Image (tube, rainbow, N blue to C red):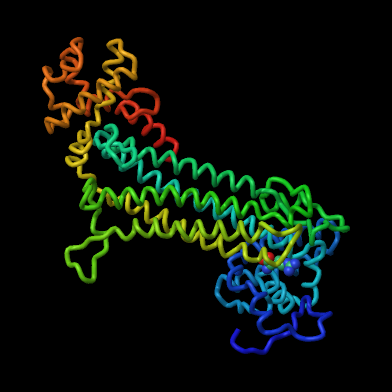
Amino acid sequence: MNSKKTKTNKIWGERMTSKPSYLLTKINASIDIDKKLYVQDIQASTAHCKMLAKQKIINKDKSNKIIKGLKKIEKEIQQKKFKFSTFNEDIHLNIEKRLFEIIGNDAGFLHIARSRNDQVTTDFKLWIIEASQILKNEIKNLIKSILKLADKNKEVMMPGFTHLKNAQPVLFSHYLLAYVEMFKRDYKKFSNVINNSSENPLGSAALAGTSFNIDRNYTTKLLNFLKPTDNSIDSVSDRDYALEFLFVSSLCSMHLSRLAEEIILWNSDLVNMIAIKDKMLTGSSIMPQKKNPDGAELIRGKTGSVYGYLNSLLVTMKGLPLSYFKDMQEDKKPVFETHDTLILNLKIAKELIENIVPNKNNMKKFSNDGFTTATDFADYLVKKGLSFREAHKKSAKLVNIAERKDMSLDQLSLKDIKKIDSFIEKDVLKILKTENSIYSKKSYGGTSLQNVVKMLKKLKKEFK
Ligand code: ARG
């Protein structure tokens, strides 16, 4: 809007004695953001129009004329020939105004038995359903890359951590599959978003329903919803589905951010567990030696804005009595921005995963640092008859001996180990080795290679 001149709104301006103020027109307009909904708006209007004709609320000729006009508008928008105007407020009125220009006053029959209140939430639900499907695909692509990396490095060992202190040896592949489980849940959660958004609000009109003999089951079928919503007031007031979309996006972003953080950490000069190929690194404008993992850092950084968007809509909604308020127009930006950010983060995460090279030797060495088989030793003692608490104490003693001698547990001699208890036999030497520790974790879901191979097979089948 360049000029400070404003125009009377042709659709709702009849009772106004003056034109709206420039600033009101500006704050009221959402077209710059909600034009993204044009496909859904035309789809929903077409379904509504077909229903009106089927129910003989408008005649077939008018209906065909309206649908033809809507198709033309869709083409104009696709071909970037459509002139969006702030004076026409939002996507619904921009399209309706253009329909008047194309087909004349018959355009005025389209808005029978509906309101922008049910129109906007119908469009938005359709958009969120499609966006969730796209996100599911991106998550699937990421999962497939992680599975590939895990498969390629099935037997690579690394230390598992708690409190960022070396805890127990695990397989790198097992570690990676932990992320697959998280993304698998995100994938399922987006399916739930789709399911929960699949009730059709169209026909709820402003808030009370309508006196026209509409067929809401018919529009439900045409728009691929599962069922019509049951309460007209709830239908126009509800933005739960958008919040659920934002929450699931936040969860998925959190998982991506944790993965990004691990990649940054593993790639640091202090840890040096992985190398990242140059394709995914950036340089420094002052320090010539630098290769920085900016991609991973930005995944982590952008997660902050995704959380912010969830919070912004929660706050927008929290004080609103039923049913519709213009506050709710602020629901779209958080959802659209979140969607774009999450798509980008998922794609970058996939590319990062494809460009990671584990430093196998370092990883193996680290898996033995920090006395990581101390728990295996305690378990060994339990299998010889001690209680776990007793064994825990004795294993701590063994760690003290090794620490004093500046040795790893598997470097201790049988003589030293026997100082802990006389019943200890030669078989203990094997127990203290990291390979054996991993091999022994055969409980369901544990890190043994045998388990990981089975899980990999199962997951590869699931995400073909
Ligand atoms: N642009 C509006 C929105 O996104 C459409 C609904 C307008 N409804 C109304 N009663 N003013 O919320």
Displayed quadrant of residue 47: bottom right
Left or right: 87 with respect to 438?
Answer: right
**Above-or-below relation of 272 to 156:** below
Displayed quadrant of residue 371: top left
**Above-or-below relation of 144 to 75:** above
Left or right: 122 with respect to 256?
Answer: right
Query: Is residue 67 something that shows in the picture?
Result: no
Give the quadrant of ligand 1: bottom right
Name the residue located 12 percent from the left edge and 18 percent from the top edge: 414
Q: Position of residue 347 (x, y in %)?
A: 40, 55
Q: Position of residue 209 (x, y in %)?
A: 83, 56
Hey, which residue is sitting farthest right in the picture? 211
**Above-or-below relation of 385 to 245:** above
Task: Quarter of the image for the N terminus: give it.
Answer: bottom right
Left or right: 136 with respect to 196?
Answer: left
Counting every numbered tag in the picture gives: 0
Q: Nearer the viewer, residue 269 or 45?
A: 269
Name the residue located 69 percent from the left edge and 62 percent from the top edge: 120
